[in-house]
Amino acid sequence: MDRYDVVIIGAGSTGAYLAKHLALRGHSVLVIEKLPKTKVGTKYDIFHIEAREFERLGIPRPVRGDAAWAFEFEKNYNADPLTLYPKCQINHIVGLHMHEYTLLLNAEAEAAGAKILYSCEFEDFLYDEQGKICGVTAKYRGREKQIEARLTADCSGMAAVGRTRLPADYGVENAPLTDEDIFYVILRYVTLADPKDYLEGSTFWAYYKSWIAPCADPHGAIIGIGACHSFDYAESVYAEMEKTVPLPPYTLEKTERGRTPYTRSPYSMVADGFFVSGDAGSLTKSVNGEGVTSSMVQVQLSVNTLDRALKLNKTTRDYMWEINKKYNASQGAEFAMLRALLVGVVNAAGFDEFQYAFESGIISDELLNAMNGAPVPAKTILTALKGFVCGVANKRLRVSTLKAAGRALKNAVEISSLYKKFPSAPAGYAAWAAKADAVYERIGKIR
Ligand SMILES: Cc1cc2nc3c(=O)[nH]c(=O)nc-3n(C[C@H](O)[C@H](O)[C@H](O)COP(=O)(O)OP(=O)(O)OC[C@H]3O[C@@H](n4cnc5c(N)ncnc54)[C@H](O)[C@@H]3O)c2cc1C
């Protein structure tokens, strides 16, 4: 039997980041990864990180010429379904190759002292006499391997192989994601036919949850679409999008498909001897389903607690509970609020109303930049308010849509303040969860 302080399932970005930080604090860490090293991080090619995140999270910042670097851009347009009134948000984005970047993070974890065992697949948990998780069994080179650990972290991505294998009532929700909770993403890598169309930024069409963004080839682009339910449904929305959005002429080079969680994270992310992070804990952003940095944020605010729990030999649900409190009161509350707003507004507003929101200035450059922390000028708020009033008067906005937006706002405020009052100890959890469930019932799921 092998013995470590921590065993982490999965050497994706989250597992590698967690491994590095626990190893740096002197713990013995083993990461088991079912894929060989040559395949890790190959689920798709290009992903984005906001430039400001590298420093905040202390992760490597590739530059032009590095294997992981693909491109950078600053202009992020948001457009109406007809693309007549695009609005621009300035946010420096770095495009990276997922495989190469994952290898960088793996190398950082190893340099910090963690061991990564590739081609080693988690199978089940080991339990001690009290029924507490004390490690894992895994398949390695055709043989069962037992690994004892005081903490097991599930960072296995969408598969959530650890979380979904937890016994009922172990302390972390164990239900697998349903199709309603998954964003099915289709990426078309294309070459643009006309040099005048070469991209200097990205454009996002919220109505279709679709976008066009740069790719590693400066003459190319990635046209993406994401939708809940299924890839077929995403393709049907893409077909609708092509009817109104004036996409530049292109030649299709290749298509990639992937899935990302689009649902709330479990209310509790810790249990006796267990911690969940990354896609395994649905820690993706509610605005776009991106999860690389948001998972690292959760790891960052968990590491001190995990470190102390390991040092004091108290890797129990009760001792690690403060992770839930810290997470739910910060990023958890923010994501919950945005989810409530988005689901309410996107589900209610029709094509013409989206069109009107861009045309009237309800959605403006200033409003989009405010999402990145820029101050919102009073004039922007006045223009938006005028847009609402005129929209109703001119019948460009339905009263029912405004009412739905009002309900979404109320749900958003309610769920966010509930998250901020997450109980400090497990004692108050059941009552809190019942209240949160009731608000989520009202929020519903994105169509
Ligand atoms: C098409 C697409 C585009 C995206 N674009 C972005 C983007 O631009 N920016 C962004 O931030 N996010 C993006 N996301 C989301 C992002 O990819 C994920 O949130 C992120 O990769 C999750 O990292 P992770 O380490 O939690 O999981 P993963 O990267 O999935 O890693 C999990 C690891 O666990 C391993 N594993 C699974 N089962 C087992 C087992 N039984 N035993 C051992 N190991 C196991 C897997 O092989 C894998 O290596 C995108 C998602 C998709 C689908």
Image (cartoon, rainbow, N blue to C red):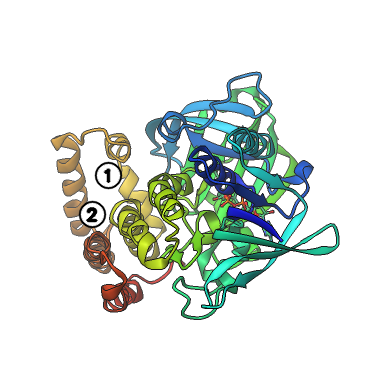
Q: What residue type is labelled 2?
A: Gly
Residue 158, quarter of the rendered image: bottom right
Residue 126, quarter of the rendered image: bottom right
Task: Write the residue at 50% across / 48% down.
Answer: 290
Task: Write the residue at 68% across / 34% down.
Answer: 100
- Badge 1 element: helix
Is 259 or 241 nearer to us in this picture? 259
Report if residue 263 is visible in the image.
yes
Q: How crowded is mark 1: few (under 14 residues within 10 Å), some or many (20 or more)?
A: some
Task: Write the residue at 18% across / 58% down.
Answer: 393
| Quadrant for the N terminus in the image | bottom right
Is 45 or 163 nearer to us in this picture? 163
- Badge 2 element: helix
Q: Where is residue 246 in the image (x, y as percent from the top left)?
A: 55, 41
Task: Write the residue at 38% across / 72% down.
Answer: 444
Residue 341, quarter of the rendered image: bottom left
Q: Where is residue 248 in the image (x, y as percent from the top left)?
A: 61, 36
Q: Position of residue 146 (x, y in %)?
A: 71, 64
The residue carrying mark 2 is 391
Residue 240, placed above or below residue 387: below
Report if residue 432 is visible in the image.
no
Residue 431, placed above or below residue 375: below
Tell me if label 2 and label 1 are in contact, CB under 8 Å.
Answer: yes
Would residue 148 be found to the left or right of residue 321 on screen? right
Q: How crowded is mark 2: few (under 14 residues within 10 Å), some or many (20 or more)?
A: some
Q: Where is residue 254 in the image (x, y as percent from the top left)?
A: 75, 43
Is 59 or 335 nearer to us in this picture? 59
What separation in Å lies between label 2 and label 1 (alpha carbons)?
Answer: 8 Å
For ligand 1, tell me if the residue under mark 2 lies within 8 Å: no
Please report whichever mark, 2 or 1, sits nearer to the chain's N-terminal start: 1
Q: Which amino acid does label 1 sit on?
A: Ser
The residue carrying mark 1 is 360
